[in-house]
Amino acid sequence: MITMPPLRTLCIAGFVFCAGLIATALYFQHGMGMEPCPLCILQRVAIIAIGLVLLVAAIFNPSGLGRRLTGLLTVIAAASGGAVSARHVWLQGLPEDEVPACGPGLDYMLETFPLAETLDMILQGSGECAEVAWRLLGLSMPGWLLVIFSGFALFGLWLTFSRPSPKSEALL
């Protein structure tokens, strides 16, 4: 039988992983000069949300309802980020003649349009969202994030629906 590490350890590891992802994104942006598109920004927000949920869980080490709430919030943030990543991957796979035209910048949209309209415009994507500037093992950044969001969603589901064994509860 496989013994899982304590919840606090898993949450700290998840938080550190999220922090590493944000540090990597900032390196690509500032160190390599790759400006993020609006969909990239939304994916960063989802990673930050997951990281904050896991940090709070690591600090308070919840059990029972708190553990399920942590799982549910993780699933919601991961599903939101995964949906944006899936849309981003879809845009990157479009033929060149079907790629939407480049739109205004995120700062301009947030200042000019209501939030709901801005989110709608962002999710429609633009030409800059369809560019693939980097790949690793055949997957672009949004492709890797889709895999990562799927992993966090599974972790959140596990937290929501699993019951810790009495032995592991005693360790917490």
Image (spheres, helix red, strand yellow):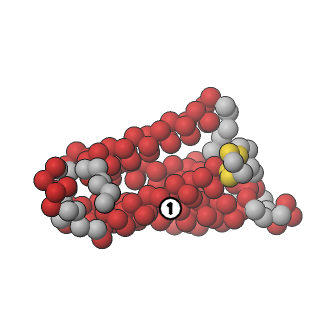
Q: What percent of the width, then of the height, locates residue 165?
A: 20, 62
Left or right of residue 129, residue 41 in this image:
left
Q: What percent of the width, then of the height, locates residue 19?
A: 43, 40
Residue at the far top: name it.
31
Residue at the far bottom: name it.
161
Query: Residue shown at 52%/54% (left/top)?
Result: 148
Occupied quadrant, residue 130: bottom right
> Where is the N terminus found, in terms of image quarters?
bottom left
Query: Residue shown at 55%/50% (left/top)?
Result: 41
Query: Residue shown at 22%/45% (left/top)?
Result: 59
Nearer to me, 103 or 49:
49
Query: Residue shown at 62%/28% (left/top)?
Result: 31
Rate crowding at label 1 as few (under 14), some (14 to 19) or many (20 or more) other CA atoms within 10 Å. Answer: some
Count of marks placed on residues: 1
Left or right of residue 108, residue 23 in this image:
left
The amino acid at mark 1 is Ser
Left or right of residue 98, residue 35 in this image:
left
Residue 57 visible within the image: no
Occupied quadrant, residue 9: top left
Occupied quadrant, residue 126: bottom right
Name the residue tied to disc 1.
150
Q: What percent of the width, then of the height, locates residue 27?
A: 58, 33
Residue 128 sits above or below residue 17 on the image: below
Nearer to me, 106 or 65:
65
Q: What percent of the width, then of the height, locates residue 78?
A: 45, 60
